[in-house]
Image (cartoon, rainbow, N blue to C red):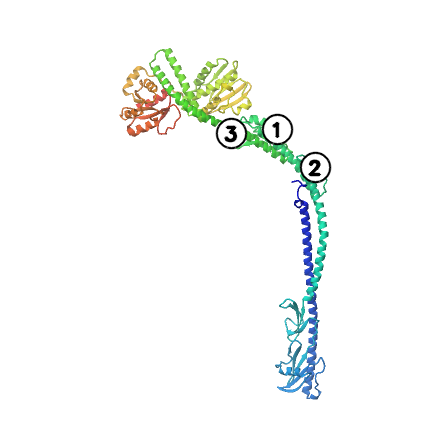
Amino acid sequence: MSGAARPFWRGVRARVLLVVVAAGLATVAVETIAVVALVQHDKEAWVSDRLVREAVHEREIVEDRVALARAELGRQALAARAGDLRELSRPASRHAPSAVLILRGREEVWAAAVDDASLAALRAAPGLDAGEVVGVGPSAVRLALGTTDGEVRGLVPLELGPPEGWRSGLSPARGAPGSVLVTTDASGERLVARAPISDGLAVAIEAPLGPARDAAFAISRQVVLWSILALGPLFLLAWVFSRRVTSPLRRLAQAVVEARGADVVVPGLDDDEIGDVGAAIRRMSRALRAHIAGLRSVLRFSRGASPDDSPETVLPELAAVLLEVLPGWRLVRDGEPVEDAVPIAWDDARYGALAPPDEATPTERGLGELFARTAARRVHGAALSRAAALDEKLRTLGQLAASVAHEMNTPLAFVKANLLALEQTTRGEDERAMIEDATVGVDRLVRIVRDLSAASSGGAIATREAVSMRALVTGMIRMARSRRPLGEVTVRAPDEAVVSCDRGRIEQVVLNLVNNALDAAGPDGHVEVRVEAGRDGVRVEVEDDGPGVPAEVRARLFEAFFTTKAAEGTGLGLYISRSFAEAHGGGLTLERSEPGRTIFALTLPLGQPADEPVESPDEEAVTERRARLPRVLVVDDDPQVVRAMIRWLKRRADVFGTTDPLEAIARASTGLFDLVLSDLRMPAMSGVELALAIREACGDAGPRVVVVTGSDGDIPDDVPHLRKPLDDASLEALLGAEAA
């Protein structure tokens, strides 16, 4: 709400006015109360002082009267001892006792009084010790003097004269002689002063407090009246003071409202605290404008995020923004030593740093840190986005691979079985060569199907064997040259370079690297493959003299489904190759890339020297071993697979096949079979269920059951299984174990 529309009572001016008026009222009230209390105390103190003076005066009068009375009684006692009773006279002076009684022993010798009542009172009073003074009522005392043969008693009236309205008299003494004790009576309306004398008595004077309080109240009313009259100037002073204090604040607030995003133009202010506030607002306005501009730049930079972001694309963009927003700041690559640098990092990933100038302010440094975090977030977010997309693609690919593997491996199984059976019965060289080429093609199809499954799970399960890398590299170069005859390829590989690997997997890796190098080098280019054997493993380098890998591509080179070949590539080649290498305990990296020289490096652990190839048994060997061939039962729901497996295995084993799992259980229960090869997926019963049924029916004496599957399935660890189609090595291992 603007100052013009705000109610007066909600403004600062009203609050200042309220504070000043409240302070004035409080001051007047305190002063009034204090004055009233002081006036009342002063009046009561005046009464107390006068009361003390009167008490001291009356005490002096009483002491003088008692002293004169004692002197008169002493004269009378002397006259009595002299026997000159004629000299005794009646008390006539106002200072003499009003009654005198002379006793000799217990006999009254002489008596005199100003009136009969005084003499009667003296005679009726109890006896006194010599020199004792006793009060008689509030205005008389009795005293006695001892003689040699008696005593003299006297009654002395006291003529006390307090001011009008006051009362005086005698009372028992309280306090030391010579002092005056002032107290308030039980009603609190009168002051009592007691002045002790030397004979155990005290002169008591009472003074009322009512007149003093009435006088104090009259003065208090006048003070309150003048205080009320002083409130008018107080309100006027508060009004003027509030305007004086709030006027600069109103001008300052109006300047802030009128700025509307621009620099605040502060009006002329005094050199005081309000002026300091105006200067601070001006500085704050400029700082806020700089902050807003910087935040908008950060926002624009963050909005440029895309799934293709990488350090090679984001960092140059950040450097361009820094030139505009933070002059003097520069981008440094990770590893360059820079003091007080702002890292561009996310978790454990570090992409570089920002080097601030020496004169960088805390605000600029904070903006630089925000840019660094935003850049790191863009790179990290893009990686997460690509990983999520990759996971989705791999999940879809896994579903597709499972279906393709099941549908393709079954026909591939009986095709390969028929080829292997045909190879065993064929003697012509050309025919055997044709069969071998067809078998290689089938194996290639099998590996492709398995690679789809491996890509869907992000890696591969390797079946290791000792492989000569020189022979493997030479064979893959020959295969690549059959498709790309142009260009020059050279090989440098020692014979002793042997690795423990899955031959098919590593062949695919090397073939992929050579094909990529030939594509990059072009028809007139040169590709060199180097194999180096070290203490820790074998290193295969594939170098070409092509244009090199672009910088913006290098970070994503090994990502699944990322390709630079448009419709010609699937984006799985290098991804699967690296997965195969890592599954073997090795790695695949881009070692160097620049125009004219690009090097990919494959590392693998060392293995044992390659075994000699196993030759196919001839007819005589087969005839000699037939008497001890193992008995095998083949179970598959596809009759073609059953017939192909029988043709392939009949030279190595006694084989019987069936498509009915129940028949298989019955035959296995006869005890005539050593090995059962069962398909995993069958309509009537799965291979796992068949294996468990045979195990339950035959116990430990039953045949060994091996499940053969064309895709990844949920197979328990205690059920042996192999992948379709079977090869010679797997078959020889199975039959050899059963023969043993």
Q: Counting residues from the N terminus, which is met first, the one under dot 2 or under dot 1?
A: 2
The earlier-in-sequence mark between 3 and 1 is 1
Residue 489 on image: x %, y %: 49, 15
- Name the residue tied to disc 2: 265
Kind of residue at badge 3:
Leu
- Residue behind mark 3: 384
The residue depicted at 71 percent of the width and 57 percent of the height is 225
Tag 1, which secondary structure?
helix
- Disc 3 and disc 1: Cα gap in Å? 24 Å
User: Counting other residues with Cα less than 10 Å from the Cα at mark 3, is it few (<14), some (14-19), or many (20 or more)?
Assistant: few
Q: How far apart are marks 2 and 3 (CA)?
A: 48 Å
Q: SS class of the residue under badge 3?
A: helix
Q: What residue type is labelled 1?
A: Val
Q: Is residue 303 left or right of residue 226?
A: left
Q: Is residue 393 above or below residue 108?
A: above
- List the residue tagged with mark 1: 321
Q: Which mark is residue 565?
A: none
Looking at the rendered structure, the secondary structure element under dot 2 is: loop
Q: Contact (CB < 8 A) between labels 3 and 1?
A: no
Q: Where is residue 103 in the image (x, y as percent from the top left)?
A: 64, 85
Residue 523 vs residue 434: left or right? right
Instruction: Identify which residue, 693 or 317, lies in the foreground.
Output: 693
Residue 379 location (% of width, % of height)? 54, 29
- The relative height of residue 62 versus residue 432 in the rendered view (above or below) is below
Q: Residues within 10 Å of mark 1 (few under 14, many from 20)?
A: some
Q: Earlier in the sequence, mark 2 or mark 3?
A: 2
User: Looking at numbered disc 2 in the image, what kind of residue is underneath it?
Assistant: Val
In the rendered view, does 617 fall on the left or right side of 574?
Answer: left
